[in-house]
Image (cartoon, rainbow, N blue to C red):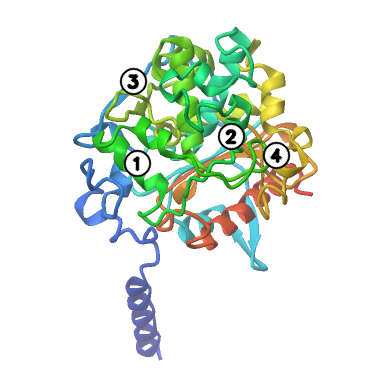
Amino acid sequence: MHIRAAARLAIALSLLAASGVGAEPDEAVLGKGRGYPVGTASSWYGNPYRVGSWSAMDTVAGMPIRNVARGSVTTPLPVAAQPANIRYRYRNIGYTLDEYLERQRITGLLVIRNGEIVAERYRYGRGQDARFLSFSMAKSVTSMLVGIALERGVIASLDDTAQQYAKELAGSGYGATTVRQLLRMSSGLTFSERYDGNDDVARMSRAAATGRPPVVDVLRSVGDRHSPPGDRFVYASAETEVLGRVLAGASGRSLSDLTSQWLWQPLGAERDAFWVLSQDGQERSSGFFNASLRDWGRLGWMLARDGRVGDRQVVAREYILDATDATRQPAAFQPRRATPYFGYGYQFWLFPMRERSFGLQGVHGQAVFVQPSSGIVMVQTAVQEAASGQQDPQPGQERDAFWRGVLESLGGRTE
């Protein structure tokens, strides 16, 4: 009898080993056997280079970057005495935080409540020194810089046209678009973004990486319209690239300098950040900001406090509310109107909840989600295979379920 039990145990253990229980999802495909290698300027985007490259883009050969210096004072981000017991439900099955990590390609996960870390996880060999690629979370960083520029009078009005500051766009469709319309991605110009390698965003990315043609030529070439300016939200990374050029032209300074002095130093970041550059030396403002998980958390906590760090108002409160409050948006930009689920503010995604909740989002699973009233912030960095929910809705749907579980577990509101 004991021999049979031992045999059954041996079979069970062999089956567990074969199934990869305890392994991180797709770790072989993602390059674990090679130590999660860093790619080059031509290979960084694909497997098996995603983990290594997307957490250290400054080490990718041939990738130009510009540093964003932290200040001399770091804002405390203490670890709570008791870790959070986070649970969520997805497709009518209950899961824990650790089970979420076993189901998704998460490289970093951080949950903050009232300025304290209640959960922090690193996966695939990453750690606190990793500086994670934002993808389109950078758009919200660019928006905050616009808000600061407006408060300081560097930009006179959100209703000024882009070409008043970005002279290289004078006479073009984007040049004639107002800053406010760009913030809402409502230029009305047709710019395709399907993530299939054959769309306009791929054309713009190739221009940024090679300089052939220059990015500004791609921006100037966009002239067809799908709607009158300001009428409707249609996602287009080109509009944030234009905002980056507006900021540079208005200030006469690089986006990296502005980010450091206006945002990163007053934020109290603990590590330098950096922007990846186009070949023309312009920061790629639509998707290439890089920061540590905890500093992404500090950014989220500042947003949860409506732009404040300590007693200092870093980004004007009214701008933050205009950017993130669904009730302040025109009807066409509100949740379930701008998209079937999200609304869209000034480069922020707005959740369909009564309680103001919003997020920064990037392709392949990057997110910072914020609910100010409950003081809850969630940061996730990831290397999901599909770029967006159009290609594979499952990771985004489960992430939304997990976010709602975080809120429910920590006393937030989901209705």
**Would you say residue 298 is visible in this rendering?**
no
Mark 3 packing: few (<14 Cα in 10 Å), some, or many (20+)? some
Q: CA distance from mark 2 to mark 3?
A: 23 Å
Q: CA distance from mark 2 to mark 1?
A: 19 Å
Question: Is 334 positioned to the left or the right of 195 in the image?
Answer: right
Question: Is 293 positioned to the left or the right of 332 in the image?
Answer: left
Callout 3 secondary element = strand
- Which of the 4 image quadrants contains residue 65? top left
Q: CA distance from mark 2 to mark 4?
A: 14 Å
Query: Which is more foreground, mark 2 or mark 3?
Result: 2
Assess whether mark 4 and mark 3 are in contact (beta carbons under 8 angstroms): no
Residue type beneath disc 1: Ser
Question: Is 328 positioned to the left or the right of 392 in the image?
Answer: right
In the image, what residue occupies the spot 68% across and 33% down? 324
Query: Which is more foreground, mark 2 or mark 4?
Result: 2
**Would you say residue 322 is visible in this rendering?**
yes
> How far across and how far down the image is residue 346, in percent?
62, 32
> How far across and how far down the image is residue 104, in percent?
47, 57
> How far across and how far down the image is residue 285, in percent?
44, 30
Mark 4 packing: few (<14 Cα in 10 Å), some, or many (20+)? many
Callout 4 secondary element = loop
Q: Which residue is mark 1?
A: 205
Residue 347 is marked as: 2
Residue type beneath disc 4: Ser
Front residue (pair 362, 160): 160
Query: Which is more foreground, mark 2 or mark 1?
Result: 1
Q: CA distance from mark 3 to mark 4?
A: 31 Å
Residue type beneath disc 2: Gln
Assess whether mark 3 and mark 2 are in contact (beta carbons under 8 angstroms): no
